[in-house]
Image (spheres, rainbow, N blue to C red):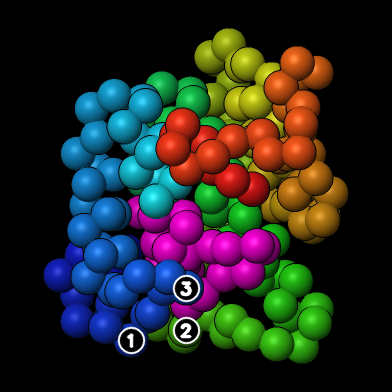
């Protein structure tokens, strides 16, 4: 995992914002005390490295950090991190299938692939906890992505309870991840 001070981050540009802001947000994610703050900070980070099912090289270096966060904390925090990793993989597979970037940088490629391969293990780490429907959708969708079904996994991750189904299920302001 690239340390936040590693100079290679300078070559891994986010989709939005700049590298320094992205790294500051990733560091803030590790300091978030409440689930609400964690969700808002992760939403901000995701807006920098993932947008409209498109990603960037920086996302592949962020993934191992999300995997580390996915091993601790509430099941909601872990599910959000697992979902983020799965969404990076959905975007990568979509790009590869379409014949366009982003290309996984060679120096982070092996570790990124290991993180994606560990998605089922990360989900299994949540099995002893009760799951709300949004958490279940994130985790089930991530399993589908890990097992080679990215489009279906992405669709499942968007599932919401009937009372919450509308055209815009969440916003940046309420700590929701707009995907």
| Eye-nearest disc, 2 or 3 | 3
Which sits in the foreground, 51 or 75? 51
- Tell me what residue is drawn at x 26 percent, y 83 percent: 10
Residue visible at 71% across and 31% down? 137
Q: How crowded is mark 1: few (under 14 residues within 10 Å), some or many (20 or more)?
A: few
Residue 69 spot, x, y in % from top left:
36, 41
Identify the residue under disc 3.
15
SS for callout 3: loop
Q: Where is residue 1 in the image (x, y as percent from the top left)?
A: 32, 64
**Residue 11 tag number:** 1
Disc 2 and disc 1 in contact, CB within 8 angstroms: yes
Q: Give the range drawn in magenta.
A: 45-65
Q: Quadrant of residue 89?
A: bottom right
Report which quarter residue 12 is drawn in.
Answer: bottom left
- 59 lies above or below 157: below
Mark identifier at residue 100: none
Q: Is mark 2 on a helix, strand or loop?
A: loop
Is residue 14 among the parts visible in the rendering? Answer: yes
- The residue depicted at 75 percent of the width and 49 percent of the height is 154
User: Does 112 sit left or right of 11 as displayed?
Assistant: right
| Above-or-below relation of 81 to 47 | above
Q: Label 2, on which residue? A: 105
Q: How far apart are marks 3 and 1 (CA)?
A: 13 Å
Which residue is nearer to you in this view: 76 or 20? Answer: 20
Q: Residue furthest left?
A: 5
Q: Is residue 23 magenta?
A: no
Of residue 68 and residue 18, the one placed in the foreground of this image is 18
Please give left or right for residue 123 compared with residue 49 in the image. Answer: right
Look at the numbered disc 1 and give the secondary structure of its residue: helix
């Amino acid at each position: 995992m690239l340390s936040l001070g590693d100079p290679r981050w300078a070559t891994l540009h986010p989709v939005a914002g700049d590298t320094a802001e992205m790294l500051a947000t990733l560091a803030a994610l590790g300091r978030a005390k409440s689930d609400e703050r964690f969700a808002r900070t992760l939403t901000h980070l995701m807006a920098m490295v993932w947008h409209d099912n498109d990603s960037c090289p920086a996302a592949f270096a962020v993934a191992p950090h999300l995997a580390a966060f996915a091993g601790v904390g509430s099941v909601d925090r872990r599910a959000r991190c697992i979902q983020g990793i799965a969404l990076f993989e959905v975007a990568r597979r979509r790009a590869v299938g379409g014949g366009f970037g982003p290309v996984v940088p060679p120096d982070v490629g092996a570790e990124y692939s290991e993180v994606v391969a560990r998605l089922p293990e990360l989900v299994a780490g949540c099995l002893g906890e009760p799951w709300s429907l949004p958490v279940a959708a994130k985790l089930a969708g991530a399993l589908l992505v890990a097992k080679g079904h990215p489009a279906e996994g992405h669709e499942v991750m968007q599932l919401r309870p009937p009372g919450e189904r509308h055209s815009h299920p969440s916003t940046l302001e309420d700590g929701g991840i707009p995907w």
